[in-house]
Image (spheres, helix red, strand yellow):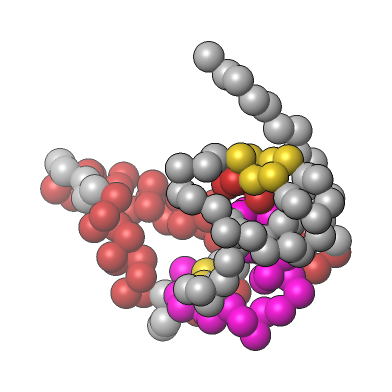
Amino acid sequence: MISKAYKTELDPNNVQRTLLAKHAGVARFAWNWGLARSIEEYKLTGKSSNAVEQHKQLNALKPTEFPWMYEGSKLLKADRFFPSTKTCSACGVIKEMPLSERTYRCDGCGLIIDRDLNAARNLLSNVKTNQSRGTEVRKS
């Protein structure tokens, strides 16, 4: 039974639209590359490699054959002590709250929001406003 629903709309700016297109292009290429490898291996050996083996093969080829794939996706890591669940995503007030509390209620502006949604908004805002806090830990 669904007790809550959230309506979300993406409205990317031009830079974000370009990054989304690059990411989708890299994902599409990886899918097609894996499919072609499976078909080729099946024709030669009667077996095809699994997704984990193909992922390892593709990662080995990226630096030399497909360096452009690194532009399509980046993982950013927020500072481990960034208070994403304790900070109001609307006004920035920080408050202590136990892990068992699933709804964030702001004492500053009165916002009531799911704790995880609040944290997601804070992490997104953190990356947008201060990318120097985030550390690029992997390109894929």
Residue 55: percent from left, percent from top: 32, 60
Q: What residue is rendered at 31% in x and 45% in y?
A: 39
Above or below, 126 against 130 in this view is above
Q: In which quarter of the image is residue 120?
A: bottom right
Above or below, 10 against 74 in this view is above
Magenta-tinted stretch: 119-140
Residue 104: percent from left, percent from top: 64, 45
Which of 38/1 is in front? 1
Left of 64 or right of it: where is 46? left
Total numbered labels placed on residues in the image: 0
Q: In which quarter of the image is residue 84?
A: bottom right
Which of 27/40 is in front? 27
Q: Does the magenta stretch include residue 46?
A: no
- Residue 74 shows in the view: no
- Residue 54 shows in the view: yes
Q: What residue is rendered at 69% in x and 45% in y?
A: 105
Residue 83: percent from left, percent from top: 58, 66
Identity of the residue furthest to the top in this view: 1
Q: What residue is rendered at 61% in x and 40% in y?
A: 103
Residue 140: percent from left, percent from top: 47, 69
Q: Quadrant of residue 96?
A: bottom right
Which of 30/95 is in front? 95
Q: What residue is rendered at 24% in x and 58% in y?
A: 53
Q: Does the magenta stretch include residue 136?
A: yes
Left of 83 or right of it: where is 10? right
